[in-house]
Image: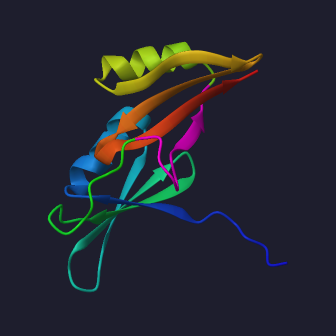
Amino acid sequence: MAKFTWEHVHLRSPDPEATAQWYHDKLGADVIRTKNADGSTRIDLNLSGQKLFIAMADPAKTGAPPASPYLGLDHFGMTVDDLEGAVKELKGKGVAFTMDPKQIRPGVKIAFLTAPQNVSIELIQRG
């Protein structure tokens, strides 16, 4: 069987700069700007070692983001050491949550936040 490794998540945004700034300000992502051959600027993120690409999207030509839960890729998850502390910090930065911290089983707590374009992100504390 072929070996597969993780490459990236691709986001679409009507304002890639604003979206990149949100991920930088709220989640500490590094913003990487590179010039394309046509002179435009490509915006990527390094979010905890994972690549997120942000492409310009024209809302008139692109479907609206779905409301969770839905079929397909529903959310991505990130671990934190102190879930309550992380949620308090993010709420202080104006981040909206769709689920406040909740213990789902012994040793595992989760919360869900909403990023630009209705991207759902799960925060997980294990242990």
| Placement of 113 over or under 38, stated as above or below | above
Tell me if 32 is positioned left or right of 21 in this view: right
Give the residue displayed 53% in from the left and 13% down from the top: 84
Quadrant that contains the C terminus: top right
| Placement of 27 over or under 1, stated as above or below | above
Tell me which secondary structure the magenta stretch mostly adopts.
loop
Q: Nearer the viewer, residue 100 or 36?
A: 100
Give the residue displayed 37% in from the left and 33% down from the top: 26
Give the residue displayed 26% in from the left and 54% down from the top: 64
Q: Quadrant of residue 21?
A: top left
Quadrant that contains the N terminus: bottom right
Does residue 74 belong to the magenta stretch? Answer: yes
Percent across and percent down for residue 75 are 51, 45
For the rendered model, the colour scheme is rainbow
Does residue 37 belong to the magenta stretch? Answer: no
Q: Nearer the viewer, residue 118 or 127?
A: 118
Q: Residue furthest bottom?
A: 37
Tell me if 84 is positioned left or right of 26 in this view: right
Percent across and percent down for residue 78 are 57, 37
Q: How many marks?
A: 0
